[in-house]
Image (tube, helix red, strand yellow):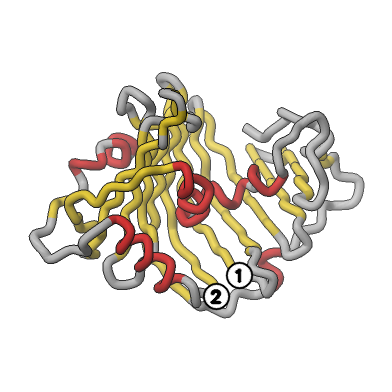
Amino acid sequence: MIRCLLCLLAVAAPLQAQEPASADAVLKLHDTRTAGMKSWQANFAKAIAQGTNVIMQTGTVRLARLPDGGEKGRADFLMQVAGRELNYRIIAGDDGVVWQLVSQGNRTGIYKLDLNRPIEGSKESPRSVNPINELNPASHLQKYRGQLDFALEAPQTLAGRRLHQLAGKPKVAAGVSQLPFGSIRFWVGAEDGFIYRIAIADLRGAPMLVLELSGLKTNLNLEDGLFIYAPPEGANVLDLNARLGQRPH
């Protein structure tokens, strides 16, 4: 499964079909088709390369748009890293507080990140490190869009779905890229404009991250309780705003 995810060109076949004239046309398709999407749910598989190790995450992610334009979300998944299997849950509520629960056996670590508070000792915005965004392909596009030059590449198909392929390369200022990767690709649904896959490669072209979504359902009535969490009384909660660098593994 890891090899399949990381070898993108082997799992998607080019299509012979009329395509949009430019990358800008595909970006506009994404913007217009997803603008009215109030909520979505999908299965996901994510592979993260760290040296010779690959961290795998597989599960379900749900996101719902808030009236102020923000989002609340929830992800429930299994994470495999260094021979360990961890049960992982991310709950991002409409109050701007994000909970991360990491369990192995009968031990559970509870991490709290308040997006409304600064991170101690850092100029980084808490919202820029909201972990639920890492499972939302559109968040990756939004984060890097202004810093990328896009090219439209050959269309592909995945699970019978026609996809436009956008290749983004960092804009170079004074001969130096300002981004920590060499390229990023987005696979955009030809019908609905949803981003079903992203792939990030390093400066040598080696895979750094692949995120693939399937089983998409949109505009669901997601229960409020999915996005609410309260730690048990007396639980040891690690405050990520006060403990810079103490991220869950």
Residue drawn where x is 24% and y is 64% of the image: 161
- Residue type beneath disc 1: Arg
* Residue 245 % position (x, y): 71, 28
Label 2 with label 1: CB-CB less than 8 Å: yes
Please tell me which residue lies in front, 172 or 216: 172
Q: Residue 65, which numbered label?
A: 1
Q: Residue 224, which numbered label?
A: none
Distance (Cα) linking label 2 and label 1: 5 Å
Callout 1 crowding tier (Cα within 10 Å): few <14, some 14–19, many ≥20? some
Residue drawn where x is 29% and y is 72% of the image: 191
Instruction: Classify the position of the C terminus by image quarter.
Output: top right
Seen in the picture, residue 64 relative to 77 is either above or below; the reply is below
- Residue type beneath disc 2: Lys
Which residue sits furthest right? 234
The answer to which quarter of the image holds residue 235 is top right
The answer to which quarter of the image holds residue 87 is top right
Seen in the picture, residue 50 relative to 41 is either above or below; the reply is above
* Residue 197 % position (x, y): 36, 52
Q: Which residue is mark 2?
A: 38
* Residue 98 % position (x, y): 72, 52
